[in-house]
Image (spheres, rainbow, N blue to C red):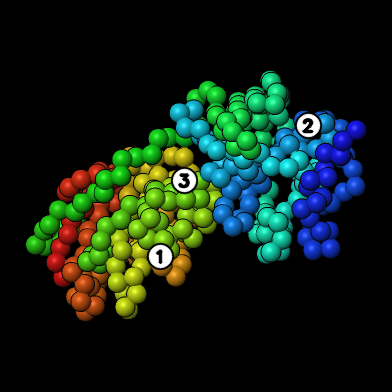
Amino acid sequence: MSDKLSKYRSKRDPKRTPEPVPDAPSPSPEGNAFVIQEHHARSLHWDLRLERDGVLVSWAVPKGLPADPGTNHLAVHTEDHPMEYLTFHGEIPQGEYGGGTMTVWDTGTYETEKWSEREVKFVLRGERASGRFVLFRTRGKNWMIHRMGSAVRDPFPPLSPMLPTERARLPKDVAAYAFEFAWGGRRLLVPIDGGRTDAAREHPWLRGLAESFGSRTAVLDGEVATLGGAEILLFYDLLYDDGRALLDEPYTARRAALEALELTGAHWQTAPSWPGEAGAVRQAAREQGLPGVVAKRLDSPYEPGPSKAWLFVES
């Protein structure tokens, strides 16, 4: 009988890595376990592992499981892993194979509908991952993974920003608005999916932000401004969060969801907002040499394009 873990062991030194390195396969009693691990290695990816004949047959999925049947994701077939990997999490030392942080993203059981050398059809039953999937081989180690059935998240919203209407005076009903600085920067919408963002093509420093989201999807609205001589991205709205479109939610709900993300980094942060504080915010903008303030109705949805629910008032 061939040693299914020989390749796995050849890549690891138990004296240098905390990973389990058993001498032989050890199947679980059920025989149908799975685990998905979030792996922050040289590049973020997710490892899908399905129990089969005493080992975990494994694929590295750079963008995670697809949420939409219309989009297939790459899945790279890797070496079989031991059953002990079902619960493994920790830091694999840099310089070692797969060096980086690994956490258990989900675990559970699965049902096999088909298993061949070129196609694996299965149903996942986990806490975060569920549904029918098929893995199909394309070339060499490269496979694709496809979700069967319905989409499990809202489609991404159109990437068109909501724009304020200019006014000479502050609104009279100040209690109905939140007041924010107009930073005088360049508007930027940041879509994040699979730990990546297209916005990083122009701003490479956003790769760290996108990776920090892991499998969480989002579309953030903000402004690239220069503060203290440094370029920083100030976020002030959230259009999409964890598979759910927020455009129809009121400003107060979107703002609360944005603040819950606790976005703070060397190149990005959440812009401040002050409900009802019209005069003080405008005075502070004037003292700091900013163009003005933006008044945003607390009950307003997100309306791409010019909107009277957002008002720009010069400082």
**Quarter of image, res 240:** top left
Q: Bin the neighbour count of mark 1 within 10 Å (Cα to Cα): few under 14, some 14-19, many 20 and up.
A: some
Q: In the rendered view, tell whether residue 122 sits above or below residue 267.
A: above
Please state if 169 lies on the left or on the right of 138 as rendered.
left
Q: Position of residue 233 (x, y in %)?
A: 35, 64
Sequence order check, earlier mark of 2 and 1: 2
Please state if 98 lies on the left or on the right of 201 as rendered.
right
Q: Disc number at residue 268?
A: 1
> From the viewer's perspective, is the residue at label 3 or at label 1 nearer?
3
Q: Which residue is denoted by mark 3 in the rendering?
A: 193
Q: Position of residue 200 (x, y in %)?
A: 40, 56
In the image, farthest residue toward the front = 140
Q: Position of residue 264 (x, y in %)?
A: 46, 66
Sequence order check, earlier mark of 3 and 2: 2
In the image, what residue type sits under mark 1? Trp
Q: In the rendered view, tell whether residue 129 sits above or below residue 236.
A: above
Q: Residue at x 63, y 38 (%)?
A: 141
From the viewer's side, name the closer residue of 64 and 75.
Answer: 75
State the CA–CA distance, disc 3 to disc 2: 30 Å
From the viewer's side, name the closer residue of 190 and 14.
Answer: 14
